[in-house]
Image (tube, rainbow, N blue to C red):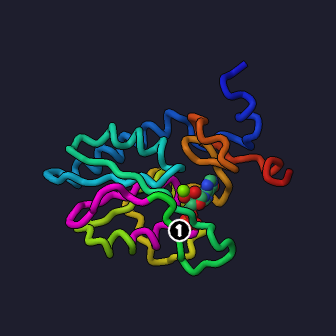
Amino acid sequence: MEPNAELYEDLEKVLLTREEIAEKVRELGRQITLDYAGKKPVLVCILKGASVFFADLIREIELPLTLDFIAISSYGSATKTSGVVRILKDLDNDILGKDVIVVEDIVDSGITLSYLSKILMQRGAKSLRIATLLDKPARRQVKDLKVDYMCFDIPDAFVVGYGLDYDQTYRNLPDIGILSPKIYEK
Ligand code: IMP
Ligand code: MG
C-alpha cells in the first residue's frame, strides 16, 4: 500500500504534485532573493496552513533573513465579512522598520490578509509584501488586496495537503488535492 493511501482516497484528484510545487517554490525563492538583495527581510508564517510552504520557501531564499510566526482565526464571527480577524498567537518580535514578507497558504476572500496587512503596517513595518502558495481569485471579496508573490492560481474548489487542512486533517500530504465533496457532505 502507498504511504497515506487512506488520505489519498478522500481526494477527487491530485491538483498539484510535490514536484510541481517544489519547482514553483524554488522559482519564488530565487525571485525573493533578487528582489531583497542587500536587505534582511522578516518572513512571517501564518500558522498553521502556511507552515509546510514556509519551511520549503525559506530554504530557497539566499539572504540573511529572520523568521516569525503568527496564528490568526478568520472565522471568529462566522458569517460576518467585517474584516475582523482574531490574533491567536502574535509575533514574537517587533517589526518596526523591517521589510516584512507575510507567507500564506491560500488567499480566498482576502479578508484575513487584508486585515493582517493593516495591523502589520500600523506597527511601523518599513515595507510589507504578501507571498501565497495558492490564489483562488474567483472567491475574492477584498478587491484591492495586492498579492505580490503567488505560486499557483487555482479554480474554486476546496483543496488540502502541503499544509492545507480540512478539519485539521490532510496537512501532511506531500501533494495538493481537491477534497472529494463526499467528505464534507458526511
Ligand atoms: P480568506 O482569504 O480570509 O477568505 O481566508 C483564507 C484562509 O481560509 C486560508 O488561510 C485557509 O486557512 C482557508 N482556506 C481557504 N480556502 C481553503 C481551501 O481550499 N483549503 C483549505 N483551507 C482554505
Ligand atoms: Mg490559513
Does the rendering let one see residue 137?
Answer: no
Q: Which residue is drawn at 49% across and 49% down?
A: 50
Residue range of the region highlighted in magenta in the rendering: 90-117
Farthest residue, direction left: 38
Mark 1 is surrounded, within 10 Å at the Cα level, by few (under 14), some (14 to 19) or many (20 or more) other residues, namely some
Horizontal side of 156 relative to 148 (left or right) equals: right
The correct choice, above or below, for 179 with respect to 1 in the image is below
The x and y percentages for residue 164 are: 59, 48
Asked whether 51 or 131 is in front, the reply is 51
Instruction: Where is residue 142? Give x, y as percent.
Output: 52, 76
Count of numbered badges drawn on the protein: 1
Answer left or right for 31 relative to 164: left
Tell me if 142 is positioned left or right of 7 in this view: left
- For disc 1, the marked residue is 86
Where is residue 185, by image quadrant? bottom right
Who's the residue at 34% across and 42% down the image? 58
Q: What is the quadrant of the N terminus in the image? A: top right
Q: In which quarter of the image is ligand 2?
A: bottom right
Question: Residue 143, can we see it?
Answer: yes
Q: Residue 121: which quarter of the image?
A: bottom left
Residue 30 placement, left or right of 106: left
Q: 166 and 32: which one is in front?
A: 166
Seen in the picture, residue 102 relative to 182 is either above or below; the reply is below
Residue 113 screen position, x and y as percent: 47, 67
Is residue 91 within the magenta segment?
Answer: yes
Q: Residue furthest bottom?
A: 82
Q: Is mark 1 on a helix, strand or loop?
A: strand
Q: At label 1, which amino acid type do we have?
A: Arg
